[in-house]
Amino acid sequence: MNESNALLAKQFHQSDEIAFAKLMNRHHQLVFRVCLRILGHRQDAEDATQETFSRVARYLHRWDPKRPLEPWLVAIAGNRSRTLLAKKRTVQSFTLVSDPPCEQVHADRDAATLREELDLALVQLPDCQRTAFELFHHRSFSYAQIARKMNCPEGTVKTWVHRARGSIIQQLRQRDVVAGNRNCRQGDAS
């Protein structure tokens, strides 16, 4: 019997370790290929694949079973690979230079972590919101350009981008990635 990803995830949530093993076996090649393409080294790709599935096991409860699992896995694999690549560069630069770690290294690591968390949050958005958000923030499209590309009114695009921002911020706060006082409003003086 070929169980769906959603069924296997549900079984895993009910402490069925075999269900997670089936998910890993089903998607191992996809995750490994993504990691190998980014890292270019088989051993590093195997390490990143392992880290990817470790992260998936920890956060599978956050995946929306109404959405395909594969894009979520690819986002995590890509982020784990880029993080591993950044760590390797940092280690290599430290072996060449005897200086202590600088603020830039910590900033780069924090930025990589934030990028990974943002990608995880983006995967959870409805397609229209994610597309509008990415076109606006990543590709610097205007609202009018996005409206033409998505064949909808400009006001709808503004709503999608606004809702996407709110949802992303909420997800990042829930995962303690960003701090925020929900009781403060812009313009309030303390």
Image (spheres, grey):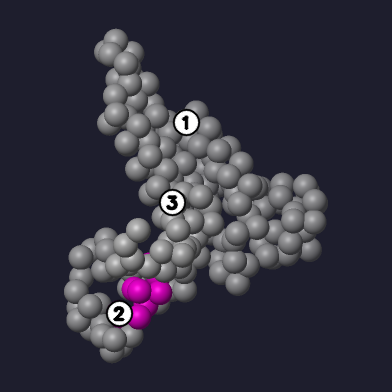
Amino acid residing under circle 1? Asp
Q: Nearer the viewer, residue 125 or 187?
A: 187
Secondary structure that dominates the magenta span: helix
The quarter of the picture where the C terminus appears is bottom left
> In this rendering, does residue 123 appear at all?
no
User: Which mark, by number, is residue 178?
Assistant: 3
Amino acid residing under circle 2? Lys
Q: Residues within 10 Å of mark 1 (few under 14, many from 20)?
A: some
Earlier along the polypeptide chain: callout 1 or callout 2? 1
Residue 58 shown left or right of residue 93 in the figure: right
Q: Residues within 10 Å of mark 2 (few under 14, many from 20)?
A: many
User: Which mark, by number, is residue 131?
Assistant: none
Separation of residues labelled 3 and 2 (CA atoms) = 24 Å
Look at the picture and state if 184 lies above or below 175: below
Where are the magenta residues, as a range?
Answer: 157-165
Q: Which residue is mark 1?
A: 44
The residue located at (35%, 80%) in the rendering is: 159
Q: Position of residue 177 (x, y in %)?
A: 46, 49
Q: How many marks?
A: 3
Q: Tell me the element at label 1.
A: helix
Q: Which residue is mark 2?
A: 158
Q: Position of residue 62 (x, y in %)?
A: 60, 59
Look at the picture and state if 137 lies above or below 76: below
Earlier along the polypeptide chain: callout 3 or callout 1? 1
Q: Nearer the viewer, residue 25 or 125?
A: 125
Q: Is residue 162 magenta?
A: yes
Earlier along the polypeptide chain: callout 3 or callout 2? 2
The residue located at (20%, 70%) in the rendering is: 141
